[in-house]
Every structure is written in structure tokens, then in C-alpha cells.
Image: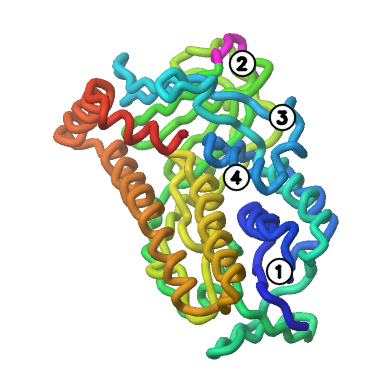
Amino acid sequence: MTVDIAVVGAGPVGLAFACGFANTNTKVVIIDKLPKAVLARPGKDGRDIALTHQSAQILKKIGVWDYISLRSISEIKQAIVQDGYSSYCLDFNCHDIQKKCLGYLISNHLIRKNLYKRLKKISNVTIINNVECESIITNSHYASISLSNGTTMKASLVVAADGRFSKTRSMLAIPTFSHDFQKNMLVCRMQHEKTHNNIAYELFHYTQTQALLPLKNKQSSIVLTVPKDIALTLMKVHKKKFNKEMQNNFNNRFGKMTLIGERYSYPMITIYAKKFTTNRFALIGDAAVGMHPVTAHGFNLGLKGQEILVKEIKFAIERNIDIGLSIILQNYQLKMHCVAAPLYFTTNSIVNLFTRTSFPAKIIRKFLLRLTNVIKPVKHIFLHVLK
């Protein structure tokens, strides 16, 4: 089999990337180990994704947004950031960006489901499922891919979209900056007595962070970043005790809180690939940059990155240039670093600062919250990523 682009990984960013080549003559193949039934109807994983307006526009551009039911989309009107139990907060409002909301919340499994649904209508994209990529060999003319079913494939370009623990990235010996926070992200959905008024909350305590993302019908997506032992306890504790714990964590702000469905836990390890490309090979999504959830920009960054790569590839195709040439991939790498590096390293720095218990760290935190609130240009830097 000979293709133009082989994408390894049918996660949301890999699927979005492939959708970007609708109505073109570019032959794209997606390789994934999951069965077709799972790709078509992915199970719930507890994660609700906060989308910026820019990300919503990308999903509209590739024809996916219209597949998502309006009942499944929640709006964030306001975001409040607090340091511990201090009454002072950093406040972001939708009026600050002159839009009706700051962003949107959509369940991760619904994004994946509708990306797949859109992809099935694109004739130049093929999905090969139930197989794994066993080796990739590149030369100056093409990349050769060996699959677990015995198939060998030639591609002008291989794109890895197989997550932050990417096997294909390892095959090409691309190193990463990696940071294990020794914590887990625990996510769940809760019903509560009092309304959230479409306000998202981010509470920085000294050993953990707590976020509440507003959903419809007095429901919220809860995201806790806690030490591993606490995460293990919270995953096992009886539902009634868990409910009480969450009520206390949010200082009874939402009244009685009740767990809906399952609890999910994920290790909190961030990665940043030291390079995003090599010979006829590129990284996108979490395979390129795996973000900390505290700023909720992991998927937004993934969508932006794949859009940059799609544009560079289309630029080459329009000029009859080989899409796997290093100059094309280097253009993507440079633009991606400019977007990703400030967001990734700033986020990690914020997390490290806001979880320290030292007295100087506490003073700096309070100063930064006030500085960001009061100095308009500083606040606009944060608001810019929401537009």
C-alpha cells in the first residue's frame, strides 16, 4: 500500500488532522489498534473538554461542529481562580473578550465519536483498525511502515498522534522533556443543589488543585489534581463519603453534591518533545506536547498544532512540493514551538508555584493574582488564548 500520509493513532487530534484533508486528492490512512466498534462509539472516560472559540472554529472548519448536538454543549460565561480559601479571586468574564461566553464544554467521548462520524464521510481517508505500527524506517524518498498484520506501507509522511506515551515517537528516538508531578488527576461528574451560573472555578490549595467546570442542569465536571495516595483513597471511598468530601472541598458553595456515574483517575505526567519532526515524520497532539490539565488547554493546543501542520502540507501540495521535505516540516516545527513552548512551560511553572507551601510562594501567589486582575495588558495575555 502506498499513501501520501499515514497517521498513527485515531485519537481526537489524529482524527481532526485527517478531516482537514476532506475534498482533496491527498490519500490519508489512519492506523489504530482499537476495534472499529470502539472507534465509532467510544466509551465515557470522565473528561469534559473546555474548548476555546478558536478551537470551536477549527471544528466548524473541518465540518465536525454541526455533528455535535447542542444539548451536549455547555457554555462557560465566567472563570474564577482562587488561592486556597482566600476570598480574593482572579476573575475572567466573557465580556472581557466581547463574546457571549468564554468557551464551551463538551465530553471527550462525544468529540471523538463525532470526529469519527465526520471522517467516515471523507472518501480519501481510510482507517485500518485492530493493528499496531511495529516499525518505521525513513529515507530521502519515503517512509516504510510495518504493521502487526504483516502489511507494509509506504508513505510520503508519517504523523504520530498516539498520545503522550507515543510508541512511534520512541521508534524515531525523539527525546522529551518530561515531568512526573507524582499526582493523579481524578475526574467525575456531580449533581449539585445550587446553581453554578455557568461559572468555572479553579481553586489552588497547597497539596492539590480543584476545578469545577459548569455543565447543564445543575451538573458539573469535577477535576482534582491530588497526590497519588489521596487519589487512590478517593477512588475507593464510599459514594456518600465522597459526596461529603466534595462538598467540603468547595466550601459548601454548591450545597448538597451527588456523584453521577463513575470516577476516573489518570497519572499526572507532562511531556514536551524536544523536536516535533524528523525525516518524513511529525508529531501532533499529546505525542508532541502533553499538558497539565490546570489551564485546560491540552486539546486546544492539539487542535491548533494539527491545523498548523495541515496548512503547511496544503501549501506544499499547491506548489507541487514533496510534503515530506524537511523545509516543510521545519516550518511546522518552528510555528508549533512558538505556540506551545510559552503555554507548556508557563503552565508547569504556575502549577509548581501554586502548590508550594513555603511562605515566599504564598506571598508571590497573592501578588500574581492581584497583578493579573489589575494590570489590563497582563490579563489580556491570558484572555488572548480564549478568543
Q: Nearer the viewer, mark 2 or mark 1?
A: 1
On residue 72, which mark appears? 3
User: Going 53% across and 39% down the picture, which residue do you hit?
Assistant: 54
Tell me the distance, in whole angstroms, between the alpha carbons under discs 1 and 3: 32 Å
User: Which circle's residue, 4 or 3, is located before the other in the chain?
Assistant: 4
Q: Residues within 10 Å of mark 4 (few under 14, many from 20)?
A: many
User: Which circle's residue, 1 or 4, is located before the other in the chain?
Assistant: 1
Tell me the distance, in whole angstroms, between the alpha carbons under discs 4 and 3: 18 Å
User: Which circle's residue, 3 or 2, is located before the other in the chain?
Assistant: 3
Q: Nearer the viewer, mark 3 or mark 2?
A: 3
User: Going 50% across and 43% down the picture, which residue do you hit?
Assistant: 185
Q: Which residue is mark 1?
A: 26
User: Which circle's residue, 4 or 2, is located before the other in the chain?
Assistant: 4
Q: Verify CB contact (< 8 Å) between mark 4 and mark 2.
A: no
User: Going 71% across and 74% down the picture, which residue do you hit?
Assistant: 132
Tell me the distance, in whole angstroms, between the alpha carbons under discs 2 and 1: 49 Å
Q: Which residue is mark 2?
A: 192
Q: Amino acid at mark 1?
A: Thr
Q: Amino acid at mark 2?
A: His
Label 2 SS: strand
Tell me the distance, in whole angstroms, between the alpha carbons under discs 4 and 2: 33 Å
Q: Which residue is mark 4?
A: 58
User: Going 47% across and 34% down the picture, which residue do you hit?
Assistant: 387
Q: Nearer the viewer, residue 361 or 207?
A: 361
Q: Amino acid at mark 3?
A: Ser
Label 4 SS: helix
Q: Verify CB contact (< 8 Å) between mark 3 and mark 2.
A: no
Q: Nearer the viewer, residue 145 or 348?
A: 145
